[in-house]
Amino acid sequence: MTTYFSRITSDHWAAKNKLEAAAKDLAREMDRHIIPADRANDFKNIFKQKVENLNTRFSRCKPLELEIWKPREDRSNDICIQISGVFCMELISIKTVPIFNIGIFELKSA
């Protein structure tokens, strides 16, 4: 059974407003988690929900658009989550659990 490890791959852009700063904080909150394959859709849906809540909370800012896509063909099990110009995160398929500071993803709605 596939398991995923979430990690931020790009977070070097400067936040232009409070909405982007909050989205960066959200990405850091969701970073470095182990996600069982059967919970990957829950992870993506909660991420979408939280971005929608941020867009509502900071309604005067240009709304952020969350993109979810598959990377190259040789990494077909991986999943990319991105807000262009803010951050990029990958859900990397793994077979073993890395040994460092991580958390197991717990389902919490937005």
Image: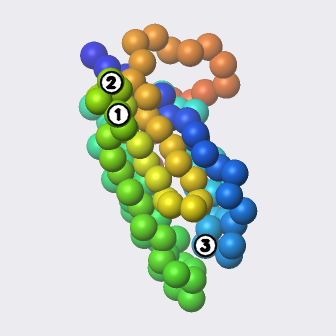
> Mark 3 — residue?
19
Residue depicted at 51% across the width and 43% down the height: 89
Residue 41, horizontal then vertical, whole percent: 29, 43
Residue count near mark 1 (Cα–Cα under 10 Å), binned few <14, some 14–19, many ≥20: few
The Cα–Cα distance between marks 1 and 2, rounded to whole angstroms, is 5 Å
Residue 23, horizontal then vertical, whole percent: 58, 62
Sequence-earlier tag: 3 or 2: 3
**Up-down relation of residue 26 to residue 4 (above or below):** below
Residue depicted at 69% across the width and 73% down the height: 16
> Mark 2 — residue?
74
**Up-down relation of residue 69 to residue 52 (above or below):** above
SS for dot 3: helix
Q: Amino acid at mark 2?
A: Asp
**Up-down relation of residue 92 to residue 22 (above or below):** above
Q: Which of the image's four quarters has the N terminus?
A: top left
Residue count near mark 3 (Cα–Cα under 10 Å), binned few <14, some 14–19, many ≥20: many
The Cα–Cα distance between marks 3 and 2, rounded to whole angstroms, is 34 Å
> Mark 1 — residue?
72
Q: Amino acid at mark 3?
A: Leu
Residue count near mark 2 (Cα–Cα under 10 Å), binned few <14, some 14–19, many ≥20: few
Residue depicted at 68% across the width and 58% down the height: 13
Residue 108, horizontal then vertical, whole percent: 44, 49
